[in-house]
Image (spheres, grey):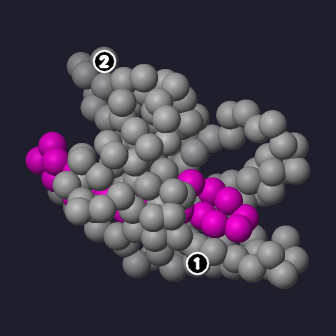
Amino acid sequence: MDNENLRILGVDPGTATTGWAVVEERAGKIFPLAYGCVSTSAKETTARRLKEVAGDMEKIIRKYRPEEAAVEDIFFFKNVKTAVKVSQARGAMLLTLERLGVSLFEYTPLQVKQALTGYGRAEKKQIQLMVKNILKLKNIPRPDDVADAIAIAICHINSRKINNLKNK
């Protein structure tokens, strides 16, 4: 890829559903290359589910070859059990990215909301509409985890631009 193109993998980690999106920035515009989700069965053991998520994400990374990845960071959970499951999925994802040499950046939900809407307490629907509008999609990507993964990738692109301006 030349300096004007940047391919980003956005990830919204989860054990049941991990949303992912590969977007590319070309000449200041963002284009969706592919997006979807990895879903696992609750009937499987946690270890098998994590292996499945990591294996599927490895295939996606090898296919689309992102230079950088943006992963949602754990910020706050009311349910400790949910936080542990998401943390395990994040760990599997971080290990997969590190093994494959993809540069990693992490963003809290608050940072993602701020980057897309200018308001850190934006509702999920507002984020979904921004994703749809920024990428000029006909529909909001489903399930929600996919729209979240796209939002995380867009957040990273916007953060890079701000950091590049600061460093000039």
- Name the spot of residue 52 as percent of width and height, x first: 69, 78
Residue lying at 39% horizontally and 62% vertically, measured from the top left: 141
Q: Residue furthest left?
A: 27
**Image height check: is 142 above or below 42?**
above
| Left or right: residue 14 compared with residue 101 | right
| Left or right: residue 11 compared with residue 81 | left
- Name the spot of residue 152 as percent of width and height, x first: 45, 46
Which residue matches tag 1? 56
2 or 160: nearer the viewer: 160
- Regarding residue 52, the answer to whether it shows in the image is yes
Q: Earlier in the sequence, mark 1 or mark 2?
A: 1
In the rendered image, which quarter contains the C terminus?
A: top left
In the rendered image, which quarter contains the N terminus?
A: bottom left
**Region rendered in magenta:** 10-31
Q: Amino acid at mark 1?
A: Asp
- Regarding residue 7, the answer to whether it shows in the image is no
Closest to the camera, between mark 1 and mark 2, is: 1
- Name the spot of residue 55 as percent of width and height, x first: 63, 78
Residue lying at 15% horizontally and 43% vertically, measured from the top left: 28
The chief SS type of the magenta part is strand
Residue 121, disc: none
- Residue 5 within the magenta-colored segment of the rendering: no
**Image height check: is 155 above or below 117?**
below
Using a 10 Å C-alpha cutoff, classify the residue at mark 1 as few (fewer than 14 neighbours), some (14 to 19) or many (20 or more).
some
Disc 1 to disc 2, how far (Cα)? Answer: 36 Å
Which residue matches tag 2? 166
Q: Amino acid at mark 2?
A: Lys
Residue 49 falls in which quadrant of the image? bottom right
Using a 10 Å C-alpha cutoff, classify the residue at mark 2 as few (fewer than 14 neighbours), some (14 to 19) or many (20 or more).
few
Question: Could you tell me which secondary element the residue under label 2 belongs to?
Answer: helix
- Name the spot of residue 86 as percent of width and height, x first: 74, 53
Residue lying at 40% horizontally and 68% vertically, measured from the top left: 35
